Image (tube, grey):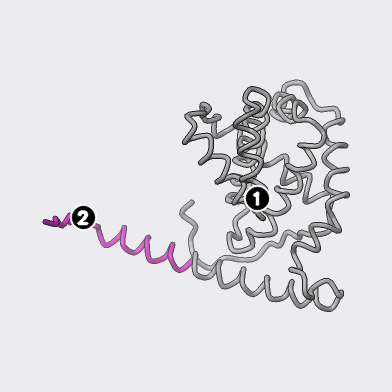
Amino acid sequence: MSSTISIEVSPEEAQLHLIQRQREEEAKAYARKKARERQQQLASMGMYGDLDGSRKEVQSQLDKAIEGFEKFLEGKYHSLSKTAKLLPILKTIPKKDRETLISDALDVMLNSVDNVSLTGVVHRLGDLVEVSVNFIREREANSKLTAKLKRALEQQSSAAGRMRTIHYTLRVNHQTWEEWNPDVKVVLGQIILHVLMESTDLFETETREVHTSSYF
């Protein structure tokens, strides 16, 4: 037996929904256009062949990104700033794990072209930092589970896949953590985004006019 739920929507709400959907479709079309242009640029540089172009770019730029991250961690910041308050979280990550974090962060950014909005990328990067830090803590506390998890992670080729694997493995083994404050994750995501934008040659920002109203 099935039931039907009816929801009444005002004409104004329906119009807002249609406008928002239009904006989303325009954004996706624009992202696909920019992705095609980027692939053509990679091809002209000889960086898009048998290997996936974005993966090859990650490899060529990773050293710059890691170096940029280390310099950022060594920087001086106002004691009352959000960066100064949250920097200890990043500094507690062992150097080898910081390299993994930055590699995964590059993977997240290069595979987020369809998002267009930097806000979505920032949230993904913040989630990545949260998962990475808590994985390290669990690794130190539970070596047996970590060995099992490490084998599972070796089967994943993307940052998103590794994040899902960590979440799933910890959940089925009843190892969870209290989710971080969203504001904390946003600031950490902004830090990672800033570092990668400034230290690599992979990304560009572009301002363009939007002809419909924004409702974010």
Nearer the observer, 41 or 99: 99
Across and down, in percent, residue 71 comes to: 88, 37
**What residue appears at the point 66 percent right and 29 percent down from the top-left corner?**
139
**What residue appears at the point 74 percent right and 74 percent down from the top-left corner?**
39
| Residues at discs 1 and 2 in contact (Cβ within 8 Å) | no
With 134 as the anchor, is 4 left or right in this view? left
Question: 10 Å neighbourhood of mark 2: few (<14), some, or many (≥20)?
Answer: few
Tag 1 residue: 159
With 3 as the anchor, is 87 left or right in this view? right
Judged by depth in the image, the label closer to the viewer, 1 or 2, is 1
Across and down, in percent, residue 3 comes to: 14, 55
**What residue appears at the point 20 percent right and 56 percent down from the top-left corner?**
8
Magenta includes 201? no
Please name the amino acid that badge 2 sits on: Ile
Question: 10 Å neighbourhood of mark 1: few (<14), some, or many (≥20)?
Answer: many
Across and down, in percent, residue 152 comes to: 61, 45
| Quadrant of residue 5 within the rendered picture | bottom left
Point out the image quarter for the N terminus.
bottom left
Q: Which residues are magenta?
A: 1-23
Identify the disc placed on residue 7: 2
Nearer the observer, 111 or 11: 111
Magenta includes 19? yes
Q: Is residue 130 above or below residue 160?
A: above
**Residue 168 seen in the current view:** yes
